[in-house]
Amino acid sequence: MRFFLDTADIEQIRKVNQWGLLDGVTTNPTLISKTGRPFLEVVNEILEEVDGPVSLETVSLDAEGMIKEGRQLADLGSNVVVKIPMTPEGMKAVRALEEEGIPTNVTLVFSPMQALIAAKAGASFVSPFVGRLDDISGEGMKLIREIREIFYNYEVDTEIIVASVRHPMHVLEAALIGADICTVPYGVIEKLFKHPLTDKGIDAFLKDWEKVPDKPF
Ligand code: E4P
Protein backbone atom coordinates (compact mmCIF):
# COMPACT_ATOMS: atom_id res chain seq x y z
CA MET A 1 0.00 0.00 0.00
CA ARG A 2 1.27 3.46 -0.89
CA PHE A 3 1.21 6.27 1.67
CA PHE A 4 0.08 9.73 0.64
CA LEU A 5 0.29 12.59 3.13
CA ASP A 6 -2.99 14.50 3.58
CA THR A 7 -1.65 17.99 4.17
CA ALA A 8 -0.46 21.23 2.56
CA ASP A 9 2.13 21.82 5.29
CA ILE A 10 5.55 21.74 3.62
CA GLU A 11 7.44 20.99 6.85
CA GLN A 12 5.32 17.90 7.45
CA ILE A 13 5.81 16.84 3.83
CA ARG A 14 9.60 17.23 4.08
CA LYS A 15 9.77 15.18 7.31
CA VAL A 16 7.74 12.29 5.92
CA ASN A 17 9.80 12.38 2.71
CA GLN A 18 13.00 12.06 4.79
CA TRP A 19 11.50 8.99 6.48
CA GLY A 20 11.11 7.42 3.02
CA LEU A 21 7.35 7.13 3.40
CA LEU A 22 6.09 9.74 0.98
CA ASP A 23 4.44 8.27 -2.11
CA GLY A 24 2.30 11.34 -2.82
CA VAL A 25 0.29 14.19 -1.30
CA THR A 26 -3.39 15.10 -1.20
CA THR A 27 -4.64 18.60 -0.49
CA ASN A 28 -8.03 20.27 -0.40
CA PRO A 29 -9.15 23.90 0.01
CA THR A 30 -9.36 23.49 3.81
CA LEU A 31 -5.80 22.16 4.07
CA ILE A 32 -4.48 24.94 1.79
CA SER A 33 -6.29 27.63 3.82
CA LYS A 34 -4.81 26.24 7.08
CA THR A 35 -1.32 27.22 5.85
CA GLY A 36 -2.40 30.89 5.69
CA ARG A 37 -0.08 31.31 2.68
CA PRO A 38 -0.67 32.20 -1.00
CA PHE A 39 -1.90 29.23 -3.05
CA LEU A 40 0.82 29.22 -5.71
CA GLU A 41 3.63 29.67 -3.18
CA VAL A 42 2.44 26.65 -1.19
CA VAL A 43 1.72 24.45 -4.20
CA ASN A 44 5.02 25.17 -5.97
CA GLU A 45 6.94 24.22 -2.82
CA ILE A 46 4.97 20.98 -2.53
CA LEU A 47 5.52 20.11 -6.20
CA GLU A 48 9.25 20.72 -5.86
CA GLU A 49 9.47 18.36 -2.85
CA VAL A 50 7.23 15.50 -4.00
CA ASP A 51 7.99 13.04 -6.79
CA GLY A 52 4.67 11.19 -6.60
CA PRO A 53 1.13 12.37 -7.41
CA VAL A 54 -0.05 15.64 -5.79
CA SER A 55 -3.82 16.16 -5.72
CA LEU A 56 -4.99 19.76 -6.10
CA GLU A 57 -8.72 20.49 -5.91
CA THR A 58 -10.97 22.50 -8.24
CA VAL A 59 -13.61 24.80 -6.74
CA SER A 60 -16.03 25.46 -9.63
CA LEU A 61 -19.33 23.62 -9.55
CA ASP A 62 -19.90 23.42 -13.32
CA ALA A 63 -17.98 21.11 -15.66
CA GLU A 64 -16.67 23.96 -17.81
CA GLY A 65 -15.20 25.74 -14.78
CA MET A 66 -13.71 22.52 -13.38
CA ILE A 67 -12.08 21.70 -16.73
CA LYS A 68 -10.61 25.21 -16.98
CA GLU A 69 -9.26 25.07 -13.41
CA GLY A 70 -8.07 21.49 -13.95
CA ARG A 71 -5.98 22.54 -16.97
CA GLN A 72 -4.50 25.45 -14.99
CA LEU A 73 -3.61 23.14 -12.09
CA ALA A 74 -2.13 20.50 -14.41
CA ASP A 75 0.14 23.15 -15.95
CA LEU A 76 1.81 23.61 -12.53
CA GLY A 77 3.58 20.25 -12.65
CA SER A 78 3.73 16.89 -14.41
CA ASN A 79 2.71 15.08 -11.19
CA VAL A 80 -0.46 17.11 -10.54
CA VAL A 81 -3.68 15.14 -10.13
CA VAL A 82 -6.85 17.19 -10.42
CA LYS A 83 -9.29 16.58 -7.57
CA ILE A 84 -12.92 16.79 -8.63
CA PRO A 85 -16.02 16.39 -6.42
CA MET A 86 -18.46 13.50 -6.99
CA THR A 87 -21.25 15.27 -8.87
CA PRO A 88 -22.73 14.80 -12.37
CA GLU A 89 -20.90 17.95 -13.54
CA GLY A 90 -17.76 16.61 -11.89
CA MET A 91 -17.98 13.37 -13.89
CA LYS A 92 -18.25 15.37 -17.14
CA ALA A 93 -15.06 17.16 -16.14
CA VAL A 94 -13.33 13.89 -15.20
CA ARG A 95 -14.08 12.40 -18.61
CA ALA A 96 -12.82 15.51 -20.44
CA LEU A 97 -9.64 15.90 -18.38
CA GLU A 98 -8.73 12.21 -18.55
CA GLU A 99 -9.22 12.32 -22.35
CA GLU A 100 -6.64 15.12 -22.40
CA GLY A 101 -4.25 12.94 -20.39
CA ILE A 102 -4.78 14.85 -17.12
CA PRO A 103 -5.23 12.40 -14.19
CA THR A 104 -8.16 12.99 -11.83
CA ASN A 105 -9.04 12.03 -8.26
CA VAL A 106 -12.77 11.95 -7.48
CA THR A 107 -13.27 13.23 -3.95
CA LEU A 108 -16.09 13.29 -1.39
CA VAL A 109 -17.08 9.70 -2.15
CA PHE A 110 -19.34 8.15 0.48
CA SER A 111 -20.99 5.20 -1.27
CA PRO A 112 -19.83 2.23 -3.38
CA MET A 113 -22.02 3.36 -6.28
CA GLN A 114 -20.40 6.80 -6.29
CA ALA A 115 -17.04 5.03 -6.55
CA LEU A 116 -18.25 2.90 -9.47
CA ILE A 117 -19.62 5.99 -11.24
CA ALA A 118 -16.24 7.72 -10.82
CA ALA A 119 -14.47 4.67 -12.24
CA LYS A 120 -16.85 4.53 -15.22
CA ALA A 121 -16.16 8.22 -15.89
CA GLY A 122 -12.49 7.23 -16.20
CA ALA A 123 -11.04 8.63 -12.96
CA SER A 124 -7.48 7.57 -12.17
CA PHE A 125 -8.19 7.70 -8.41
CA VAL A 126 -11.24 7.63 -6.17
CA SER A 127 -11.23 8.96 -2.60
CA PRO A 128 -13.76 7.39 -0.22
CA PHE A 129 -13.89 9.31 3.10
CA VAL A 130 -13.90 6.84 6.01
CA GLY A 131 -13.58 9.20 9.00
CA ARG A 132 -16.48 11.43 8.02
CA LEU A 133 -18.70 8.34 7.68
CA ASP A 134 -17.61 7.07 11.11
CA ASP A 135 -18.37 10.58 12.48
CA ILE A 136 -22.05 10.11 11.61
CA SER A 137 -22.16 6.54 12.98
CA GLY A 138 -21.54 4.99 9.55
CA GLU A 139 -19.02 2.25 8.79
CA GLY A 140 -16.16 3.84 6.89
CA MET A 141 -14.11 0.71 6.37
CA LYS A 142 -17.14 -1.25 5.11
CA LEU A 143 -17.23 1.25 2.25
CA ILE A 144 -13.62 0.44 1.38
CA ARG A 145 -14.28 -3.32 1.47
CA GLU A 146 -17.25 -2.94 -0.87
CA ILE A 147 -15.42 -0.71 -3.35
CA ARG A 148 -12.44 -3.11 -3.34
CA GLU A 149 -14.77 -6.01 -4.15
CA ILE A 150 -16.63 -4.17 -6.93
CA PHE A 151 -13.40 -3.00 -8.55
CA TYR A 152 -12.04 -6.54 -8.32
CA ASN A 153 -15.24 -8.01 -9.86
CA TYR A 154 -14.97 -5.78 -12.92
CA GLU A 155 -11.18 -5.45 -13.13
CA VAL A 156 -11.42 -1.70 -12.61
CA ASP A 157 -8.09 0.13 -12.87
CA THR A 158 -9.12 3.18 -10.82
CA GLU A 159 -7.01 3.27 -7.66
CA ILE A 160 -8.64 3.48 -4.23
CA ILE A 161 -7.28 6.21 -1.94
CA VAL A 162 -8.59 5.70 1.60
CA ALA A 163 -9.23 9.28 2.77
CA SER A 164 -10.44 11.12 5.87
CA VAL A 165 -8.22 8.89 8.00
CA ARG A 166 -8.43 9.52 11.75
CA HIS A 167 -6.26 6.88 13.46
CA PRO A 168 -3.80 4.00 12.91
CA MET A 169 -6.58 1.37 12.84
CA HIS A 170 -7.94 2.98 9.66
CA VAL A 171 -4.49 2.55 8.09
CA LEU A 172 -4.17 -1.06 9.25
CA GLU A 173 -7.62 -1.97 7.94
CA ALA A 174 -6.93 -0.21 4.63
CA ALA A 175 -3.83 -2.37 4.19
CA LEU A 176 -5.65 -5.58 5.16
CA ILE A 177 -8.45 -4.85 2.69
CA GLY A 178 -5.91 -4.17 -0.05
CA ALA A 179 -6.56 -0.49 -0.72
CA ASP A 180 -4.06 0.88 -3.24
CA ILE A 181 -3.28 4.01 -1.23
CA CYS A 182 -4.04 5.50 2.17
CA THR A 183 -3.81 9.27 2.52
CA VAL A 184 -2.82 9.93 6.10
CA PRO A 185 -2.59 13.11 8.23
CA TYR A 186 0.87 13.77 9.70
CA GLY A 187 -0.24 13.06 13.30
CA VAL A 188 -1.47 9.59 12.32
CA ILE A 189 1.74 8.76 10.39
CA GLU A 190 3.75 9.64 13.53
CA LYS A 191 1.60 7.25 15.58
CA LEU A 192 2.32 4.38 13.16
CA PHE A 193 5.93 4.31 14.41
CA LYS A 194 5.02 3.95 18.06
CA HIS A 195 5.02 0.82 20.18
CA PRO A 196 5.67 0.81 23.96
CA LEU A 197 7.84 -2.33 23.65
CA THR A 198 10.07 -0.52 21.12
CA ASP A 199 10.65 2.35 23.61
CA LYS A 200 11.17 -0.11 26.48
CA GLY A 201 13.62 -2.15 24.39
CA ILE A 202 15.68 0.92 23.44
CA ASP A 203 15.85 2.02 27.12
CA ALA A 204 17.05 -1.43 28.19
CA PHE A 205 19.69 -1.63 25.42
CA LEU A 206 21.03 1.83 26.29
CA LYS A 207 21.26 0.99 29.99
CA ASP A 208 23.15 -2.22 29.21
CA TRP A 209 25.42 -0.39 26.75
CA GLU A 210 26.56 1.82 29.66
CA LYS A 211 28.01 -1.30 31.30
CA VAL A 212 30.18 -2.21 28.28
CA PRO A 213 33.88 -1.37 28.90
CA ASP A 214 36.05 0.49 26.32
CA LYS A 215 33.24 1.61 24.04
CA PRO A 216 34.12 2.90 20.51
CA PHE A 217 31.25 5.49 20.68
C1 E4P B 1 -8.83 13.60 1.03
O1 E4P B 1 -8.18 13.70 0.00
C2 E4P B 1 -9.18 14.72 1.92
O2 E4P B 1 -8.22 15.74 1.78
C3 E4P B 1 -9.18 14.37 3.38
O3 E4P B 1 -8.80 13.04 3.61
C4 E4P B 1 -10.39 14.83 4.13
O4 E4P B 1 -10.27 14.43 5.46
P1 E4P B 1 -11.07 15.09 6.67
O5 E4P B 1 -12.36 14.39 6.82
O6 E4P B 1 -10.17 14.87 7.86
O7 E4P B 1 -11.23 16.56 6.33
Image (cartoon, rainbow, N blue to C red):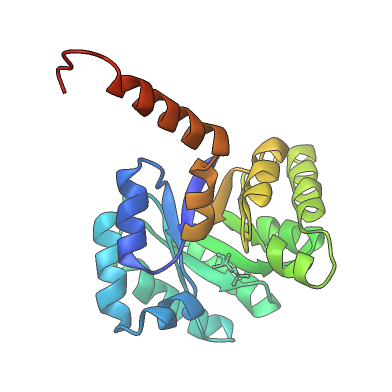
Task: Using the image, determine if residue 134 lies above or below residue 179.
Answer: below
101 left or right, relative to 153: left
Res. 199 visible in picture? yes
- In the orientation shown, which residue stands out farthest toward the top? 213
Task: Using the image, determine if residue 26 lies above or below residue 150.
Answer: below
70 left or right, relative to 116: left
What is the x, y in percent for residue 174? 67, 45
What is the x, y in percent for residue 100? 44, 62
Residue occupying image coordinates x 62% and y 47%: 171
Residue occupying image coordinates x 49% and y 47%: 3
Q: Which one is nearer the viewer's eye here, 88 or 30?
A: 30
Task: Using the image, determine if residue 207 lies above or below residue 41.
Answer: above
What is the x, y in percent for residue 169? 68, 48
Question: Total label count?
Answer: 0
| Quadrant of the image where one finds ligand 1 | bottom right
Residue occupying image coordinates x 30% and y 83%: 37
73 left or right, relative to 45: right
Residue occupying image coordinates x 50% and y 80%: 30
Residue 7 is drawn in which quadrant?
A: bottom left
